[in-house]
Structure formats: C-alpha cells, structure tokens
Image (cartoon, rainbow, N blue to C red):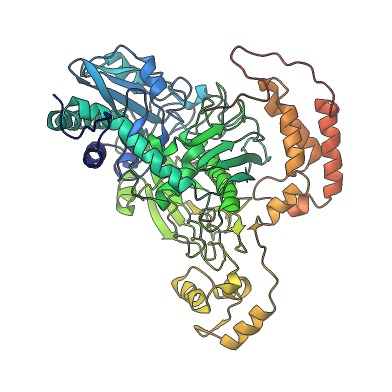
Amino acid sequence: MSGPGRGGSGRLDPVALEILSNKVSAATDQMAATLQRSARSTFVKEAADFGTGLVDPSGRVFAYPSSASVQFLIDSDCGPTIRAVPDVAPGDVIVTNDPYTSEGLASHMPDLHMLRPYFHKGRVVCYGWCYIHCTDIGGAVPSSISPSNREIFQEGLRIPPLKALCKGVFNPDFVALFAANSRTPEMNMGDVRAMVGSLETGARRVAEMIERHGIDTVLACPDALQDYSALKSRQVLRRLPDGIYDFWDYMDDDLVSSIPVRLRVRMKVDDGRVDFDFTGTDPQLDAAYNIATAGKRHHWLTVRLTGFMLTHDPTMPLNAGLFRHITVTSPPGTVVNAEFPAAVGIRHATGRRLTDAMTGAMLKAAPQSVAAPTCGATVPFVLAETDPRTGKRRLMVIEPLRGGMGAWCGGDGADARDATTSNLNNHPIEVVEDEAGIIVREYDVPIDSGGPGQWRGGAGQMLTIEVLRDGGTILARGMERMRFPPYGVAGGRPGAPFRAVFNKGRTNERRLAKIDQLTVGAGDTVTFMLPGASGYGDPFRRPPAKVLEDVILGFVSPAAAKSDYGVVIVDGNVDAAATRRRRGGRRPARPDFDFGSEREAWESVFDDAVMEELNRRLFLLPPARRSATRRRIFARAVPDLPPVGGTPLAQAMAKADEARARLRRAMDEILGPAGATPPRPLRRAGSVPWPPRRGR
C-alpha cells in the first residue's frame, strides 16, 4: 500500500521527510540502546565504542543515531560487503572485520561489522548495520593491536564478508572459528549476540514504519534524506572560501624507527565542493599505523569535515549525503591508502594526525570558523593479566584516554574531553578497579598542559594506576604528540606534549617512549599525561581575571601565568601594575602558526620541497623497497637521529647545512641523480603508477 506524504514528483514532501527523518533516527538510537545494554565487554557497554545505522541497498548510511559516540562513521561504505554476499534471505546476517576485502568498511580488525537485510515481500528494503570494537581478535599480542606489527596477518583473525547467521540461526562454523581465534571468546560472543539483538530491533522498527507509512514512502526515504543533507552540508561548506590551501603535519615516528611520518594535504574549495589531495604523504609503513582506504573517500579521510559541518549546522540529518560534495585523492601505497598486506591496527593515530593537517588547511581558509588543533592523541590502554580466580588470561581496556579540545576565535577549548574523532565515555573507576587488578592513584589534568592563548587550549588528562599483581602486561596504542606538540594558532602557543612515566617519584622512575608491551609487577605505577590542545590568539591579550581563574582551578601555574600570559599573581591576586609592566615588554606573537622548536628544527633540513621530491622519487621504486630505502636515506642524512624523548632535535640537528648536504648525497646515491630517468619498476597486477588516478 502507499502511504501519505508523496509529492507529485515522486519525492517526499517536507512534512513526510521530517517525520521519517525523526523515525529512522529514533530507530537507530533504539538499536544503539539494545546493543549497549546487552553487551558484555566494558569497552562497549561503558565506553560505547560501537555504532549502529540503517543503510540503503547500495551501502550508504541514510540514518545514524544522534546519541552515537562515534559519529564520523556516517561516511562508511557498506557496498562492497553487501555485494560480496549477494544471496541473502530473511534472517541472514553478514559479518566482516577485514579492512581489505571490505574495502575499508572495517578500518582495523578489532572492529567487527554486521549487516542484516530487511525484507518486504521478498525485496530488500534496506540493511541494518552495526559494529563493535572487539576486546581481542587474536594475533600477536593481547588485544590484537601492536604498533610493531608489519603485516595484517599478525593482527588476528581476518573475516572476509560471510554469513554469521543463516535465516536467523548462527553459522556454527563461524562461531567455532571466531571463538578459537580469540583470547576472550566468551566476552566476544556476548558482544556479538548484542549486535544481533540490535539488528533485530532495527528490523522491527523498519517493519513498523512500512506498516504505518507504506512501502513506497519508506523506499523513498533514503534518497530523500541524503539529498536533503547534501543540500544543507554544501551551505556549510561554502563557509570555506574558494581557493587552494596546503598543510602538513607529523607523527612522532613509526616505532620501528625514529623517523617522523609526514602527512600532507592540499585542500581545494570551489563553491562548497571540497577536494582533499594527499599526494606527498609518506609511503606506507612497516608498522601498524597505515590506513586501508581502498583509494576511496573514507571516514578516516573526512572525519575533520564531519565535525565542522555538524558544528555549524547541528540540524542536518546524519547520513552519507553530508559528504556528497567532498572528494578525495589518496595515492596508493601511501600511509593513507595502504596496500595489502600492510598492518593497520593503530590507524586511529594516523587519522588523528591527518585530522590536524586538514585542520591547518581549513584554518588557512577560514581562521575564524575553525578551532585550533586538539590534543592529537587518543590512547586506549590495556592491561593483560592472569585472573587469580580462574587462572585464565584476561584483558581490559582501563580507559580511553584523551586530552583537550582546541581553542577557537572566541572561546577556550574543552578540558580533558577531546571529541574530535569520538566521544567515548570514561570507564567508571569503580568498574575498572573491580574488573582489573589495579588501583587508580591519580585522575586529574596536568597543570600547564593547555596551549597558552587569548583563548586557552583545553588541558590534557592525567591518569596514574598502580598494579596489584605480578605478571601483568600493559599495552598502549596511539601514544603521539610526544615530540611534535599541537601547533598554536594566530599567536596562540602549542599545547604541552604527551608524557608517560614508569614509577613516577621513585628511585627507579623512568620516562617511557611509545609502549608496545610493558611488563609490570605488583606495586609498579604507570602515569599517562595526555597532551593539551592548542591555544588561539596572543596569550598576552587574555584577560588577567581569566588567567587568575585558571590558576585557582589548577589549569595554569603562577609561574606560567607570568611567563606565558604576562600576568603577575601575588598572594592569590593579580598585581595589576606588575602585569602592565610585564605585558609591555613582550615579544610580538606569531600571526599564523606556532609549531614549536622540534618541528622547526626538523624542517630546517627536511622542508616541504625536499620531502615532496623525496617521496616523488621513492614512489618510482617497487612498493616493497620504499620503506627500507626511506630508512637508509634518513640514516645517512641524520645518523644520530634521537628517539622520541631523547636529545631534542634542535640539538641533534644543530648543523643543518651539513645534514642537508648529506641528505642530498644520500638521495642521489641511493635513488640516482635528480632528473635521471629511473628504471621502470615492475608492477603487480592492480598496482597504480605515480601519479595515481584520482579517487572518488
């Protein structure tokens, strides 16, 4: 039957569109509630690292819950997974976690995705979709994620798109294989059953909408909603002036070497159409920091615009139409378009830095409409230990740690609550201490971590845990901004860098670099001090009363109030005369970006022009040779490159002229003289030569 609300052109009229928009959004919220309330793992039921949605038959999301903690997944493409399992029946559920065969739907293997077709009279109306982050999917280390993994085969069980349920019944082969390849099979299967329940909730809600509004109206809903969001999102994107804007940023290193990883973006804006070109980004790594995007527009490549669009128009329905006017060019074999079998476990660390690079390009375009960079690090850290009651190995994500949000022209950044890529909940301390053998000794913000500015960057987050039993292992993924802090904007200063300390305050205290696996025993403590976010505007223009308030609240020390803000505080009050004198003798603030001394030292040798040339020449080599060749060149140019946390780059690269000369010799000796015609590299089937074709 046909329900009301169809216009003469076959499209939904505005009233029907508004009604259906709210109904499909409510349906996905109910799917989310079902999943969270019935999940087993703490990371799903407490932190809420999961997602739900309704997907049109082509694989694009047309409804997404407003309550979701991870909103950038709206730009997920379920199409390849749907097409991989074309023979579906009512009650079937498709599952996958493989970034390569799903063409980027799963971006690392702990993320398990499920799709269920919803039928009406033998026809697929749409699909229900959900994902969770699995506690463990097998692989080389507990929790499956290790930065030192080189290939995806080390990262756990790969599940290509297949049926987990057939006509409503679990596929016993899938269950057996899945359980046999995880350290936490009972917990994982509990979460999987919660996913199946979520998809059943979605099926009931869709059936109710068909009964109430008619099949024709429901079939028209996905396209109509996406068209509406596309129209509204383009109006927001027109806030970015037409032009071409270049920016790049760095990850500290790739763990297997001390070499920073450069992510470069060129943003082209044309009347609300935005293209991001990542040509010039470093080659994919022999470590787990790659992103498998299949050369397409991908949620890790558009996440920065998700926040921008929804900030400036929070009324837009959440669906794939938001991204219709965004295109992406991501050269194959780069860290943002990794080719099989590159490891991808810590893709979120690369995505965070990519977001900061895109933020820089957007700040160049519209500095008063874009916030400064956030802390730039998200660190879920895991404790693996032996359960004293059962003798079995158990795992728990202690906290999904974050730092602050960036300041903006008109306001301070949020403290200890970076929601750039996700808005995961903190785990309650009571739950953590009940389920894991630890005690939380500190849960605070590091003083002076927020970047100074007329508007202060958000403070970081600090957590100290004490381990109660011997034989434990701590794993922490995403430890970044230890060398290159978030850059300040428009006179603002960088936030404080990331720090991690083992046994802080004791005789055996030591600073920790990036953690792969850290063995701990009873009585040991580990302290994480997440970076602060960037400041915006000249800090000497911050009202002294605001600086005093920051000091009273513990965000800024009296010493930093004087040195960074020019505000002199005596006996808990502002000394107005001393403050005027202090501010009168200040140095002029930088008008654009303050990258900090470490990046300035690095770019005194490895500037944009030479890195563009180096990467262009590296991509003339066969893919298997690029990473090792890159390391050889850097080893010759900077033979004593210190690790993160070691000698400052400003000291190690004091003789920049000599380093530049060594770099040029290394490039010419290893890659051949500049301008020479290189030998034609052998190509594998399906590979793409430089320059690559444009992606979608």
**Where's residue 163, x and y in %?**
31, 16
**Where's residue 230, x and y in %?**
40, 38
Taking the image as shown, residue 62 lies to the left or right of residue 246, namely: left
**In percent of the image, x 43 and y 53: which residue is there?**
465
**In percent of the image, x 57 and y 59: which residue is there?**
495
Taking the image as shown, residue 658 lies to the left or right of residue 162, namely: right
**Where's residue 284, x and y in %?**
62, 29
**Where's residue 382, x and y in %?**
43, 41
- In this rendered view, identify the residue nearer to me: 97 or 246: 246
> Eyeballing the image, is 559 above or below 177?
below
> Eyeballing the image, is 51 above or below 169?
below
**In percent of the image, x 66 and y 41: which residue is there?**
260
**In percent of the image, x 60 and y 88: which residue is there?**
577
> Eyeballing the image, is 20 above or below 565?
above
Residue 421 in view in this figure? no
- In this rendered view, identify the residue nearer to me: 558 or 365: 365
- In this rendered view, identify the residue nearer to me: 614 or 495: 614
Quadrant of image for the N terminus: top left
Residue 202 in view in this figure? yes
- In this rendered view, identify the residue nearer to me: 263 or 241: 241
* Residue extending farthest front: 8
